[in-house]
Image (tube, grey):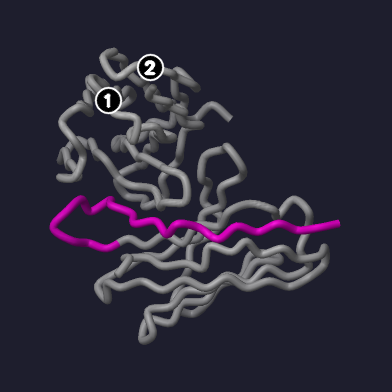
Amino acid sequence: RKEVEQDPGPFNVPEGATVAFNCTYSNSASQSFFWYRQDCRKEPKLLMSVYSSGNEDGRFTAQLNRASQYISLLIRDSKLSDSATYLCVVRTLSSGSARQLTFGSGTQLTVLP
Amino acid sequence: ETGVTQTPRHLVMGMTNKKSLKCEQHLGHNAMYWYKQSAKKPLELMFVYSLEERVENNSVPSRFSPECPNSSHLFLHLHTLQPEDSALYLCASSQDNQITQYFGPGTRLTVL
């Protein structure tokens, strides 16, 4: 089983649509959660952290369900510029590096005019 | 954005060549990382360097050799690579008390 699992998509949605991405993680000891965004042929960039109480940043809302080991990202009023791959990222303090992040394979989003 | 730079941006090499990838961070961070990103696969952590530790992913073949001369520079030395090593190699950095990692633009490597 993958440590961090995402639906690869692609998600093709019209401008203005609301779209949701889901992510599950396998290690219940995971402590920190993030969404990164990666544009085509570019490097990943932090989009937002995910907090237990849920958090919102403009059109983006992230939710965490520790009991189900599930993370979500909701994008409202999609813009063309939202087209990218969205990476679910988890940090687990293990015998490895305390800084180690585990990435999902990403969900590809294309917003259509 | 020039916080983390990588050179070269593109590299084509034969299986018998030796080359090095370079990463430099201008953010004053004290930890640096090498990741490998293959098509349709998640980013795979290869190496971590910080003042306190060096961590290696045990699945990384010995034909990849990291070097971190100081907290701002990181190298990845490559020798006798295989075609399946073709991928995007990303460098990242972070600061001790923060989790966020900042990535460089990557080196797209093709092994013939």
Query: Measured from the top left, where is residue B7 in percent x and y?
Result: 44, 19
Query: Measured from the top left, where is residue B99 in percent x and y?
Result: 37, 52
Q: Quadrant of the C terminus of chain A?
A: bottom right
Q: Is residue B9 above or below residue A44?
A: above
Q: Is residue A112 magenta?
A: yes
Disc number placed over residue B81 in the picture, else none: 1
For numbered disc 1, what is the local secondary structure?
loop
For numbered disc 2, what is the local secondary structure?
strand
| Residue on which disc 2 sits | B13
Q: For label 1, count other residues whose C-alpha is less than 10 Å away and answer few (under 14), some (14-19) or many (20+).
A: many
Q: CA distance from mark 2 to mark 1?
A: 9 Å
Q: On the rendered structure, is A42 left or right of B19?
A: right
Query: The residue marked by circle 1 belongs to what chain?
Result: B
Q: On the rendered structure, is B12 left or right of B60?
A: right
Q: Is residue B102 above or below residue A48?
A: above
Q: Decide: marks 2, 1 in contact (CB < 8 A)?
A: yes
Question: The magenta stretch spans which residues?
Answer: A92-113
Residue drawn where x is 34% and y is 35% of the image: B84
Same subunit, tags 2 and 1: yes
Which sits in the foreground, B39 or A41? B39
Q: Quadrant of the N terminus of chain A?
A: bottom left
Residue drawn where x is 57% and y is 38% of the image: A42
Q: Earlier in the sequence, mark 2 or mark 1?
A: 2
Which sits in the foreground, B97 or A26? A26
Q: Residue A90, located in which quarter of the rendered image?
A: bottom left
Identity, as a three-letter code, of the amino acid under mark 2? Met
Q: On the rendered structure, is A15 left or right of B76?
A: right
